[in-house]
Amino acid sequence: MKQQTTLLLLTLCAIGISGCSSTAKQTSISADKARQLAQQHIIIDTHIDVPYRLHKDWEDVSVATKRGEFDYPRARQGGLNAPFMSIYIPASYERTGGGYQLANQLIDSMEALVGRAPGKFAMAHSTADVMSQFGSGKISLALGMENGTPIEGKLENLQHFYDRGIRYITLSHSESNHIADSSYDLRRRWNGLSPFGKELVVAMNNIGMMIDISHVSDQAFYQAVEISKVPVIASHSSLRSYTPGFERNMDDDMIKALAKNGGVVQINFGSSFVTQMANQYGALRKAAAKQAGVADDEAFELQFRKQNPYPFATLDTVLDHIDHVVKLVGIDYVGIGSDYDGVGDSLPIGLKDVASYPNLIEGLLKRGYSEADIEKILSGNLLRVWREVEAYAAKQKA
C-alpha cells in the first residue's frame, strides 16, 4: 500500500501536479530511513507462534513459505533478528496431561531448525547471545513458554526448561491452571496466583527467567508484580482503553504498576487486541449463528465474513497503543509482541507479516519519535528487563 502511494505521488509529479514533488520526496525519504533503521538496530519481537504452527502444518521456514507470517527471507527483509518463538501449550493440556512432552517437542523443532540451517538461525539463551549474533545474518531464536502447564507443579521442571532455553513463561493461557487464574476464565480458582504460582514467581526470579503476565487475571498480575524482585513483561498484550471490558488487555492502572515495577508491555498487533470493533466481531458472529440455529463452524465463519467483512485494524491503530503507553508512563516501558502466526487472519493493514516492521518504524518517525526512542521500542526496553533478570539471578547463584 505504501509503495503504491509513493508511486502515485511520483506519477502526479511527473505530469506536473503542483506541490507534489516535496511530498513524494518526503514519503520516499521516510520509507528509506525506516528500512535503514530496521537493518541497523536489533528488533526483538517477544511473541511469534512459529513452533506450534509448524507442529500443526509443517513448512521449511528457512526459505520462503506459502503460508504463515514468518520465514527467513521475510524476517531478513523486515529486519527481525531476535524473535521469541512461542512454545505454546493449549489450555486443554492442563486437564489431559502431555504438556511437558509437547513443550519438549516444540523446543526440539526449533533446535532442529537451527540444525538444518545453521547459517540462517542460532539459538539465543541470553542477552549476550543476542548481541554477539547481531550482524551475522543469523536470526537469533529465543524461547518463551506460553502457558505454564508443562511445569506440572514441579520446580525441577522449571530448571529443565531453563536448561532447554526457555527465558520467559506466560503463567497461564485461556483457562486457569495450577499456577494462575486466566483473564479469559470466569472461574477464578485461586483469586490470582495459586500457592505454587507464588512459589514459582520467586523461583523464576532466582533462576533468571522472565515472568510474563499476558493472559493472567488482574489479580494474578498484581500479585506477580508484588512478589517479583525484578521487572515482569507482558509479552503480547495491548491496551484496555481501546477495548473496554477486554480483561486480556491491560488497563491504565496496570500499565502504571508495570512501569513502577520496571517492566514492559509488548504491544500485540492482532486487530481484536487493538480495536473495539474487531474485538466484538467474534461475539457478533456467534450471536448470528445462534440466531440462525446453526453451528458456529468454519463454513459459517466464511459465510459470515462475506456478508460482514472483518474490521481490520490499521498501522495507525497499533501506533496509537504505543503512543498511549508513552504518554502515560514514558518511552521506557513499551515494545513489540506481534503475535504473528498466532492470531489468524486478523492482522492490521500494513502489519501483515514479519517483513512489515519498517512500516511500524516509518509510522513512529512520522509521529516524531527519535531514533533513540525507536531503538528502545524495537529492543532496548526488553533487553533492559532481560538483563536485570539475568543480573538478579547471577547474584542469587553467587
Image: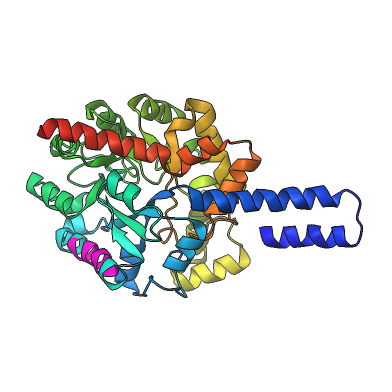
Camera-side residue: 85 or 312? 85
Q: Quadrant of residue 309?
A: bottom right
Residue at image point 41% right, 62% down: 341
Q: Is residue 9 left or right of residue 275?
A: right
Camera-side residue: 28 or 194? 28
Q: Quadrant of residue 332?
A: top left
Q: Is residue 331 left or right of residue 163?
A: right
Q: Which residues are magenta?
A: 104-113
Q: Is residue 299 left or right of residue 7?
A: left
Check the image and tell me how it is coloured: rainbow
Residue at image point 18% right, 57% down: 95
Q: Is residue 114 above or below residue 177?
A: below
Camera-side residue: 137 or 20? 137
Q: Is residue 132 above or below residue 55?
A: above
Q: Is residue 155 left or right of residue 175?
A: left
Q: Is residue 110 magenta?
A: yes
**Which secondary structure is most common in the magenta stretch?**
helix
| Residue 380, percent from left and from top | 41, 39
